[in-house]
Image (cartoon, rainbow, N blue to C red):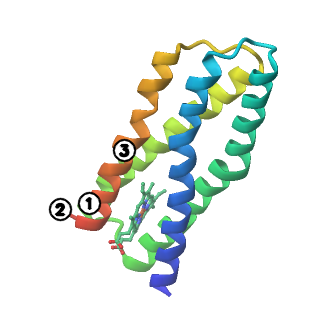
Amino acid sequence: MYEWVKALHIISVIAWMAGMLYLPRLFVYHCSAPAGSAQSETFKTMERRLLRAIINPAMIATWVFGLWLVWLGGWAFATWFEIKLVLVIAMSGVHGMLSRYVRDFAADQNRHSEKFYRIINEVPTILMIAIVLLAVIKPL
Ligand code: HEM
């Protein structure tokens, strides 16, 4: 049972991270498409579908299977897990910011530069590396 839930957790994590790493990259390209152009409308569709069809459901599944593992494995008070929890909450916060940017672009009201999105693109990567090291190595 535990191994099955863990496999489903990892599958969900892969889908969530694929979207979290790709969406800010779409924003970088979207910045150079003039508002109202056909290219900009295509980016809007790609961003909306990626968020609704992949990133949102994958985040929910990651949380459900992750919390299920905490329950089954009694990990709630393990130090590695508590640090991981803080980082996963930060990842969910970045997710919330990205959804906000999708809404801004959809309304042709982007407020940030291409450089800003390039920097934002690195945040989920750094969080992901730290989270995987904590979950696999459990150094604490
Ligand atoms: C959303 C909240 C999350 C919770 C509550 C959670 C909780 C857990 C728990 C309790 C385990 C079991 C550890 C074990 O059996 O050794 C686990 C495994 C794992 N988690 Fe998460 N997790 C979450 C999100 C994430 C995220 C965002 C990532 C990656 C970016 C991630 C990556 C992993 C990996 C790679 C494992 C497998 C570790 C192993 O088998 O050695 N988790 N998670």
Q: Report the amino acid beneath label 2.
A: Pro
- Give the residue pinned by disc 2: 139
| Mark 1 touches mark 2? (CB < 8 Å) | yes
Of 25 and 111, nearer the camera is 25
Of 27 and 109, nearer the camera is 27
Relative image position of residue 138 (x, y in whole percent): 23, 65
Vertical arrangement, residue 105 with respect to residue 18, above or below: above
Whichever of callouts 3 and 1 sits on the residue coming sooner in the sequence is 1
Tell me where residue 122 sits by quadrant. top left
Residue, x 27% and y 58% (percent of image)? 133
**Mark 2 element type:** loop
Relative image position of residue 7 (x, y in whole percent): 49, 76
| Mark 1 residue crowding within 10 angstroms, few (<14) / some (14–19) / many (20+) | some
Whichever of callouts 1 and 2 sits on the residue coming sooner in the sequence is 1
Pick the quarter of the image with the C terminus. bottom left
Vertical arrangement, residue 60 with respect to residue 108, above or below: below
| Mark 2 residue crowding within 10 angstroms, few (<14) / some (14–19) / many (20+) | few
**Looking at the image, can residue 63 be seen?**
no
**Mark 1 element type:** helix
Whichever of callouts 3 and 2 sits on the residue coming sooner in the sequence is 3
Mark 3 vs mark 1, CA separation in Å: 14 Å
**Looking at the image, can residue 89 be seen?**
yes
Q: Nearer the viewer, mark 1 or mark 2?
A: 2
Does ligand 1 reach within 8 Å of label 3's beta carbon?
A: yes
Q: Tag on residue 80?
A: 1
**Mark 3 element type:** helix
| Mark 3 residue crowding within 10 angstroms, few (<14) / some (14–19) / many (20+) | some
Is 3 situated left or right of 41 in this image? left
Relative image position of residue 64 (x, y in whole percent): 57, 65
- Give the residue pinned by disc 3: 127
